Image (cartoon, helix red, strand yellow):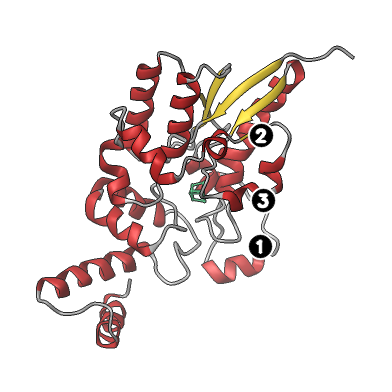
């Protein structure tokens, strides 16, 4: 069997780690045949602006891989065969299409919007090449290296090799003029803006600083059957965040029992 030539891919998420990895790989003239980015369509607008800027800076195109359908289709339009349709109807009052909100045990979006499209793309490349992937795991994220997926022979971990931590990556990018328009000052982890698996702290920032995205989140929440989070719907989150703001403006603490009692009353009174 003929030996397939090597093909080196940078797996770019657009975040600080993979961006720093890409910039340093190119600076060190390491082989890079293609830069791929799985586009869920759910990145913050600042992330898309960053990708455009990065493309211009490196003078090379970034291949944007997309799933067959967009988030909205899978979320609320895709025909889904329910295990027990009758019970589903009883619980939610009617049939709904789509997977609904993602959950800790139901990360369908990772699979549908990222893993599957990427694997399909790589499968075609592997027919012609021996594919190697540069993966942006940092030196202080060694636990991720333990995952079987990251231990495959085709994965290369340059940030670990260079001893670059997450903080080093952010600084490396900043020194080259990349700041994501402040995204990393607001969020510790930057991922899909509507992810229900984000922390409350991150959702609070989404509500506070990105009102247009929050409005879209509200619209999505009305289009589906599954609760946004086990503890709060989108409207309830809004009520909580607004109440917190109101209390803080009056100098009332928002982490004690009295606050949560008052919040519960407010939520009950709102019918949200
Ligand atoms: S970050 Fe959240 S919304 Fe985005 S793919 Fe992962 S689980 Fe889904």
Q: Earlier in the sequence, mark 2 or mark 3?
A: 3
Residue 239: x percent and y percent?
26, 69
- Count residues near mark 3 (Cα–Cα under 10 Å), then give few for <14, some for 14-19, many for 20+: few
Image quadrant of residue 170?
top left
Image depth: mark 3 or mark 1 in front: 3
**252 on left or right of 153:** left
Query: Mark 1: which secondary structure?
Result: helix
Q: Which residue is mark 2?
A: 155
- Count residues near mark 2 (Cα–Cα under 10 Å), then give few for <14, some for 14-19, many for 20+: some
**150 on left or right of 55:** right
**20 on left or right of 10:** left
Query: Mark 3: which secondary structure?
Result: loop
Query: Mark 2: which secondary structure?
Result: strand
Res. 269 in view: yes
* Cα distance between the residues tagged 2 and 1: 42 Å
Residue 47: x percent and y percent?
36, 35
Q: Residue furthest right?
A: 1
* Cα distance between the residues tagged 3 and 1: 39 Å
Q: Which residue is mark 3?
A: 146
**249 on left or right of 262:** left
Res. 191 in view: no
Q: Which mark is residue 85?
A: 1
Q: Is residue 186 above or below residue 240?
A: above
Image quadrant of residue 222?
bottom left
Query: Residue shown at 61%/66% (left/top)?
Result: 88
Q: Earlier in the sequence, mark 2 or mark 1?
A: 1
């Amino acid at each position: 069997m003929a030996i397939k030539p090597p093909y080196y891919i940078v797996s770019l998420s657009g975040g600080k780690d993979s961006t720093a990895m890409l910039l340093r790989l190119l600076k060190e003239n390491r082989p890079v045949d293609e830069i791929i980015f799985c586009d869920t369509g759910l990145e913050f607008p600042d992330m898309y602006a960053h990708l455009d800027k990065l493309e211009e800076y490196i003078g090379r195109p970034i291949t944007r891989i997309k799933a067959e359908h967009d988030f909205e289709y899978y979320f609320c339009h895709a025909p889904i065969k329910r295990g027990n349709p009758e019970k589903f109807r009883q619980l939610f009052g009617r049939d709904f299409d789509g997977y609904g909100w993602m959950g800790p045990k139901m990360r369908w979006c990772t699979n549908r919007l990222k893993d599957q499209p990427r694997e399909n793309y790589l499968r075609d490349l592997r027919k012609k090449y021996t594919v190697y992937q540069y993966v942006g795991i940092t030196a202080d994220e060694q636990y991720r290296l333990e995952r079987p997926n990251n231990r495959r022979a085709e994965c290369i971990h340059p940030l670990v090799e260079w001893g670059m931590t997450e903080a080093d990556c952010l600084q490396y990018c900043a020194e080259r003029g990349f700041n994501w328009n402040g995204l990393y000052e607001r969020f510790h982890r930057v991922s899909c803006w509507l992810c229900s698996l984000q922390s409350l702290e991150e959702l609070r920032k989404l509500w506070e600083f990105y009102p247009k995205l929050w409005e879209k989140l509200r619209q999505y929440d009305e289009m589906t059957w599954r609760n946004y989070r086990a503890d709060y719907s989108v409207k309830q989150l809004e009520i909580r965040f607004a109440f917190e703001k109101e209390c803080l403006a009056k100098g009332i603490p928002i982490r004690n029992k009295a606050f949560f009692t008052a919040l519960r009353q407010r939520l009950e009174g709102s019918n949200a």
